[in-house]
Image (cartoon, helix red, strand yellow):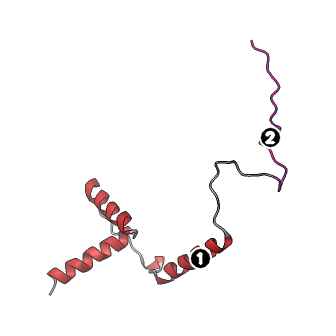
């Protein structure tokens, strides 16, 4: 049985308020950037439909169809619901008179 070595672990813990991030840690946005993001999020949430007005559609789609929807949404930086809304609007324009 090997003899246990005493390891110096003092560098693993920091006194409150005196810690520092690791060299490879991602940086946080500045207060100004965070404020701009908050304002944008507030404008977006104000323009959205309240969640109490949403209902489940309750149907399943093939994996490939879901994949196509997700690719379209990601490419256009919009939600899946927005993709479906645009598709229904386009369908109505061309097929319902």
Q: From where the camera sits, is residue 62 visible? A: no
Q: Mark 2 — residue?
A: 11
Q: Residue furthest bottom?
A: 97
Residue 14 magenta-highlighted: yes
Q: Residues within 10 Å of mark 1 (few under 14, many from 20)?
A: few
The mark that comes first in sequence, 1 or 2, is 2
Q: Residue furthest front?
A: 23
Label 2: state its secondary structure: helix
Vertical order, 3 against 84 (above or below)? above
Please state, as top left, top right, bottom left or bottom right, where the N terminus lies in the image: top right
In the image, residue 60 lies at what x, y percent? 29, 60
The part of the chain drawn in magenta is 1-18
Mark 1 to mark 2: distance in Å?
Answer: 37 Å
Q: Determine which quarter of the picture holds residue 78.
A: bottom left
Q: Mark 1 — residue?
A: 36
Label 1: state its secondary structure: helix
> Is residue 62 toward the left or the right of residue 74 in the image?
left
In the image, residue 40 lies at what x, y percent? 54, 78
């Amino acid at each position: 049985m090997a003899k246990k070595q005493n390891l110096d672990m003092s560098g693993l813990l920091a006194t409150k308020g005196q810690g520092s991030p690791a060299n490879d840690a991602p940086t946080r946005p500045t207060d100004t950037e965070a404020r701009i993001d908050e304002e944008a999020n507030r404008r977006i949430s104000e323009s959205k439909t309240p969640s109490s007005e949403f209902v489940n559609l309750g149907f399943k789609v093939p994996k490939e169809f879901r994949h196509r929807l997700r690719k379209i949404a990601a490419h256009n930086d919009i939600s899946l619901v927005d993709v479906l809304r645009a598709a229904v609007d386009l369908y109505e324009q061309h097929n319902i008179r």
